[in-house]
Each structure stands twice: as structure tokens, then as C-alpha cells.
Image (spheres, rainbow, N blue to C red):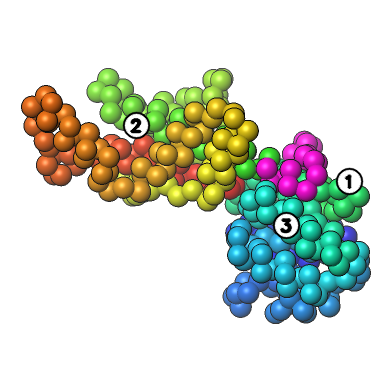
Amino acid sequence: MELGLIGLGKMGGNMAQRIRNGGHTVIGYDRSESSPRDVTSLEELVNRLAGPRAIWIMVPAGEPTDQTIQSLKELLDEGDIVIDGGNSKYTDDAIHAKQLAEKGIGFVDAGVSGGVWGLQNGYALMVGGSAADVARIQPVFDALKPEGGSGFVHAGPVGAGHFAKMVHNGIEYGIMQAFAEGYELMAASPILENVTETFASWENGTVIRSWLLDLAVRALQADPGLKSIKGYAADSGEGRWTVEAAIENAVPLPVITASLYARFASRQEDSPAMKMVAALRNQFGGHAVESASDAAPAQQAGEAAQTVATNSPASS
């Protein structure tokens, strides 16, 4: 199969290589001149592909994806197909599909998980779109997914793939936060001496063994105490969207919601909320108010709670 791929960053570049390793032709484009691109413009990319064309987009969600799809709409022909493999919000997919359908262009949304390890291990793929459109791209999906396993689902119509990936990332938030909190508690305990070794011991035989646990152990072995990592954890959007979808569907998500808020807390060097808590304790109980320097050890411990999450792959 012949595929155009737009966006050759950490994910897109590795995906292009894995698809090529599967015996397919990939013509890559990226705005960066230093990227391993094969063409220097979208126009050249479209002209290099034989019809009916298939073009996979791996660019940031939001405006970059919107602009790319609008540009492709003007360049592509009826019967061509566009696959959005970025982390777009699932509600955007129906809009993009409708825009492209005005010219008879197909659309598939593909949630992709695997991070920088995908080239070696394969990618998990959650796909939305019509059965006919998905079938056209199936050879590429087969090349990307892990060998000898499933790792692929046609989750439903347009939007279902990104919805599934959104929930996947919400679950990821919760698991990472649980590991981070367990790490902080063990690091704070005077009775537990070997935190890194304890994490490593869980990799075999326990019910919480997982790839994320393996990555946590790698991080701790490379930097015991995680002294070189700032306690800041960003959120790429899917966690927020998962909580929003839970509210819309009246589904309780206490763990995922709490993990999202914990990431917000990691961005505060000195939490205004906790300042109010300290002030209230002083007012009603006569407790002494600690200075910033007195609170430094506690703050450092709080930062440690986020470092495992910071060191894990992004979306993944």
C-alpha cells in the first residue's frame, strides 16, 4: 500500500518507519526542514501519491489539525481518504468528516498508543469510521499493530476511535497517579529503606505488574530519589475530555478526576488553597503557621509524588 504521512515527529517518524518495515510505501511530509521528509509541501505530497490516495495526519490536536484538513480538502479528490491519528477531541471528528465528505473524501479517526516504544513493540490502534473506509487502511493498521497480538479495534463510527483513546488516556492518568502516590508514601516512611528495590520486586508475580510499572522502575534506577526531575506533570487534553464526557453521561469517575486535579496541583510552587488551609488551622486552633523555608521538605515530598508521571511517555 502507498500512504502519505504528515507529521514526522517522535510518533509520526517511528510510525512511518514501522509501516515501511511492513512492506508499504510511505511518503512523509513535515514543516521542519530538518525532519526526514520526502517532500517539501502538501501539494508535492498529494501529487506524489497515486489515486485513490490515503493520507495519515500526525500533528497536534486543535488548530494544526484543523488547518491541515482544510488544506487537504482543497488538494484531494473524490475517493481519497484522510486518517487523523493525532489526539484530536472526538467531537471534532464529526466536523472533519463532514467537511471532507463535501468533496467525497473519506475520513477515519485513529487513536494511537505506544509512544516512543511503538517502532519496536508496535502500536495499539483504536479506530473509528465506516467499515469500508477502515478496510481500505487495514494493511497499514496491520503493519503498525504489535506482532502476534490484537492491538487493534474498529471501535465504531467516526469519533469512536478518538473516544476510546481518550478513555484509555484517562485510565492511564489514574494508574500513574496511584504509582506516584505509592512512591511518595514509601519515600516518606522511616521503616522502608529500599524504595527502588521494592518497585522492582513488584515487576514479577504481583497483580499490579505492568509496562507503566516497568517504566517507573527504569526511572528510579536511573535517578534514585528522582532528584533531577521537576515535580510538574502536564496534561495533553484527554484527561480533561474524559472527565467532561463522564459529566455528560452521568458516569462517576472519582479516580481519573482526582488524578487530573493532581496534575494541576503539580504546577503550583506554593498552593494558594493550602495557604488558606494553613491560615484557617491557625485561626481556629492556634496552630503555628510555617514559613516557606520550614515547608520546603514537605513541598519536595509533594513534588516527588508527580515525578513518576512526568517520566512516563506522553500518549502515548
For marks 3 and 1, give the one nearer the viewer: 3
Residue 313 lies within the magenta run: no
Report the amino acid beneath label 1: Ala
Front-lying residue, 282 or 183: 282
Mark 3 or 1, nearer chain start: 3
Whole-percent x and y of residue 285?
11, 24
Relative to 220, 147 lies left or right: right
> Gap in Å between the C-alphas at discs 3 and 2?
43 Å
Image quadrant in which you'd find residue 19:
bottom right
Front-lying residue, 102 or 145: 102
Residue 156 lies within the magenta run: yes
Q: What crowding class fits label 3: few (fewer than 14 Cα within 10 Å), some (14-19), or many (20 or more)?
A: some
> Gap in Å between the C-alphas at discs 1 and 2?
47 Å
Say which residue label 2 marks: 184
Q: Write down the region rendered in magenta.
A: 146-163
Report the amino acid beneath label 3: Ile
Count of marks, rendered view: 3
Whole-percent x and y of residue 220?
41, 39
On residue 131, which mark appears? Answer: 1
Q: Is residue 20 visible?
A: no
Q: Is residue 47 visible?
A: yes
Say which residue label 3 marks: 95
Front-lying residue, 235 or 314: 235
Q: What crowding class fits label 2: few (fewer than 14 Cα within 10 Å), some (14-19), or many (20 or more)?
A: many
> Gap in Å between the C-alphas at discs 3 and 1?
19 Å
